[in-house]
Image (cartoon, rainbow, N blue to C red):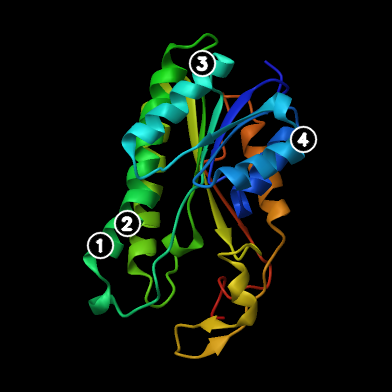
Amino acid sequence: MSQAGKIAIVTGAGTGIGRAAAQALAGAGWQIVLSGRRRELLEEVAGELGSATTLVVPTDVTDPESIRALFDATVNRFGRLDLVFNNAGIGAPAVPLEDLPLETWRQVVDTNLTAVFLCTQHAFRIMRDQTPRGGRIINNGSISAYAPRPNSIAYTATKHAVTGMTRSTSLDGRAYDIACGQIDIGNADTAMGGRMKAGVPQADGSVRPEAVMDPLHVGQAILTMASLPLEANVQFMTVMATKMPFVGRG
């Protein structure tokens, strides 16, 4: 099957990385299921991409029934599923570890980790049984899985866990021709990452601005991963602002 006409679910598709991924995939001929919390933002993206090749499904990824409805709607509309980009995620306020409320911890875990697991489960069931069999799952990890920022334990812990889930999914998916990879993103100029330009806390206690990059580059990287045949897989890709202080000592 060519890229044209393939079906992709993108979570968190209304803004930022999800929006950039949807744009890149749609530009290559994919049909996109746009998932996110706010219908108005999803409708805006659908208007850009063309309603004939998109499906808007407002989804609360912390609600298992809402996730189930997302995958049911996809199969009902398109009859199959070729790609899931598990992108939806949140951070927590940068407070000292000992002051982080348990409820905040649980919100981050539910959004960044449990939702990825549930989406992966649904994708497996569909991709395992469809003809042609198989598909691809791409998880949005983070550079934080390798080098955390100060006061980020909930976000960092969940992104470490996503890396473990990516590895397990990649292994367990072999039996069903399901490939799974992870993209780790550093300082895309989005609502979440764009704050780096104004200055953020560093490990030495200082506050310094950091370089950012256009999220369109991330969209193109995801398209590269998604465009491979199922016999090939990008297991992990890091795409980052070239001058951000990640490699080396700042």
> Please, is residue 117 above or below residue 179 in the view?
below
- The residues bearing labels 1 and 4 have C-alpha atoms spaced at a distance of 40 Å
Mark number for residue 76? Answer: 3
Residue holding disc 4: 27
- The residues bearing labels 2 and 4 have C-alpha atoms spaced at a distance of 34 Å
Give the percent coordinates (x, y) of residue 97.
28, 76
> Please, is residue 61 above or below residue 241 in the view?
above
Mark number for residue 103? Answer: 1
Q: Which amino acid type is shown beneath numbered disc 3?
A: Asn
Q: Circle 4 sits in a helix, a strand or a loop, which is it?
A: helix
Residue holding disc 2: 107
> Please, is residue 138 above or below residue 14 in the view?
above
- The residues bearing labels 3 and 1 have C-alpha atoms spaced at a distance of 36 Å
- The residues bearing labels 2 and 3 have C-alpha atoms spaced at a distance of 30 Å
Q: Circle 3 sits in a helix, a strand or a loop, which is it?
A: helix
User: On the rendered image, what quadrant is the C terminus found in?
Assistant: bottom right
